[in-house]
Image: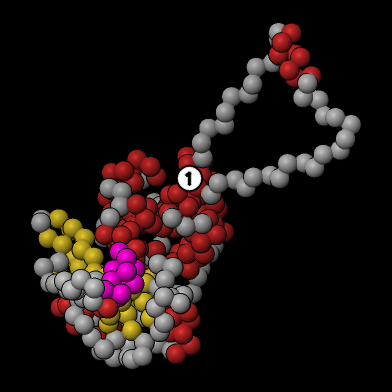
Amino acid sequence: MHQENLKPKTPKSAMAISLTSQTLLLLLLLPSPPPPPPPPSSPLLLSSALSLRPSRKRKRPPFPRPNPDPSKSTFLMSSSTFHYLLGLLEPLLDCRDPPGSPLPLSPHSRLAAGLLRLASGATYDQISRLLCVPADAARFCARRLCRVLCTNFRFWLAFPASDADLDSVSAGFLPSLPNCCGAIVCARFEVGGGRAIAAQVVADASSRILGVATGFWGDRDDSEVLRSSSLYKGRVSAPRYLVGGGSYPLLPWLMVPFVDPRVGSPRRISMPSTGPCVSRRSGPWRA
């Protein structure tokens, strides 16, 4: 597969446009400052103001509160992460426009439109109103960002292969699930026309995604998706294992809840360990 040049090129003009676009975006997202309080015109207000005079005893100044980062609520990432991605992806996002209709957009605006679509699921019309860009341009930027990420950076998100990395993941499940190296779930996302796409996700104890397998039609069950993924082909071996829901098969390296266990059976012990774990991992993705 053709790999595009990753060497960043940041001329001064593009940097100026990027900083200007960033400033405008932050001004749109920041709330308006509250109006100043009225002056103490009455004796009661004047006495209240005088009562707030500092005493002779020296007091420690209040600890300043950090300003909220608008990028966290808009793009689900900090401003520093946004700028890191901008420097990494700028030459890839700015090198191609729709045929016959060049986009007069800075790399900052292109990345903002794509990330806003991925982070919030906003429609292209909503992105158009928020960023003041045409809806067609927002659609192109979102698709271009997805293509760049899938083509050049898909190997950054892969299930751990080394023993050291797997041991680090297993430590997060102690003491409840020793040797467990992840929870697996299969989510489905509507793509229009009554069709859905299935995505298999593996996460650690802190809900950090370890691996993703997608591109399967939603009518395939979880077991079929698992057997079609690279995870099934020798990525996990005993004594390490994953935990999954009842839709998955029981395998030497996959622990699943028992089906209709008998009352009083010792096998019921496994239910509180696996079921809630997978539910916690899968809840945010299914929403």
**Looking at the image, which residue sits at the far front?**
264
Q: Which residue is mark 1?
A: 25
Q: Residue at x 17, y 77 (%)?
A: 223
Residue 286, horizontal then vertical, whole percent: 26, 59
- The amino acid marked with disc number 1 is Leu
- Return the residue nearer the eye: 135 or 174: 174
- Return the residue nearer the eye: 283 or 7: 283
Q: Quadrant of the N terminus?
A: bottom left
Residue 121, horizontal then vertical, whole percent: 30, 52
Question: Left or right: where does residue 213 sit relative to residue 37?
Answer: left
Q: What colour scheme has been applied to the protein in the rendered image?
A: secondary structure
Q: Quadrant of residue 39?
A: top right
Question: Left or right: where does residue 102 sit relative to residue 198?
Answer: right
Query: Would residue 36 be seen by someone viewing this image from the given angle?
Result: yes
**Looking at the image, which residue sits at the far right?**
56
From this view, report whether residue 231 is shown above or below residue 100.
below
Mark 1 residue element: helix
Residue 105, horizontal then vertical, whole percent: 40, 52
From this view, report whether residue 69 is shown above or below residue 224.
above
Q: Which residues are magenta?
A: 268-279
Residue 84, horizontal then vertical, whole percent: 52, 64
Residue 105 lies within the magenta run: no
- Return the residue nearer the eye: 188 or 97: 188
